[in-house]
């Protein structure tokens, strides 16, 4: 019985390490943290080119008739930073989970 308890504790520890690594240290997590920091540099009125110089190319672009939404993955898949760019290629709105 004690051996099973030790094995269970070991398995739980390994799962915790894997989940923590993926959430904090993976390439995707590092990029998400970088995107979050860069998103704070974006201001209304900036040009599309200025946004791309700071943020890089968006992970997703959603186009509408009068604007586009540039979506950037943040620190986990449930959070996304969004920058709305109007038909004149200017930032009109910034959405971030920390704003």
Image: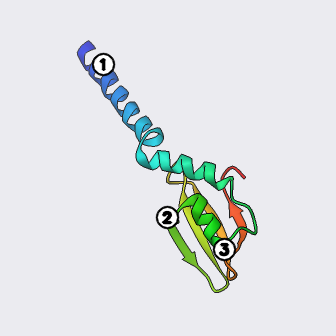
Q: Which mark is residue 74?
A: none
Residue 44 position, x and y percent, is 75, 66
Residue 34 position, x and y percent, is 55, 48
Label 1 – label 3 distance at C-alpha: 56 Å
Q: Nearer the viewer, mark 1 or mark 3?
A: 3
**Residue 86 versus residue 81 in the image, above or below:** below
- Give me the residue at 34% from left, 22% from top: 9
**Residue 87 versus residue 98 in the image, above or below:** below
Label 2 – label 3 distance at C-alpha: 15 Å
Is residue 39 toward the left or the right of residue 27 in the image? Answer: right
Disc 3 designates what residue?
85
- Give me the residue at 66% from left, 52% from top: 97
Residue 43 position, x and y percent, is 73, 61
- Give me the residue at 49% from left, 54% from top: 77
- Judge the density around disc 1: few (<14), some (14-19), many (≥20) Cα neighbours within 10 Å: few
- Judge the density around disc 3: few (<14), some (14-19), many (≥20) Cα neighbours within 10 Å: many
Disc 2 designates what residue?
59
Nearer to me, 30 or 49: 49
- Does residue 1 appear in this view? no
- Give me the residue at 37% from left, 26% from top: 13
Label 1 – label 2 distance at C-alpha: 44 Å
Disc 1 designates what residue?
5
SS type, badge 1? helix
Q: Are marks 1 and 2 in contact (CB under 8 Å)?
A: no
């Amino acid at each position: 019985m004690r051996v099973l308890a030790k094995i269970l504790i070991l398995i739980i520890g390994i799962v915790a390490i894997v989940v923590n690594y993926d959430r904090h240290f993976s390439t995707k997590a590092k990029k998400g943290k970088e995107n979050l920091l860069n998103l704070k540099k974006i201001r209304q009125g900036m040009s599309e080119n200025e946004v791309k110089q700071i943020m890089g190319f968006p992970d997703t672009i959603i186009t509408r008739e009068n604007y586009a939404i540039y979506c950037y993955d943040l620190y986990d898949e449930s959070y996304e930073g969004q920058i709305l760019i109007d038909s004149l290629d200017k930032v009109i709105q910034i959405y971030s989970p920390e704003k």
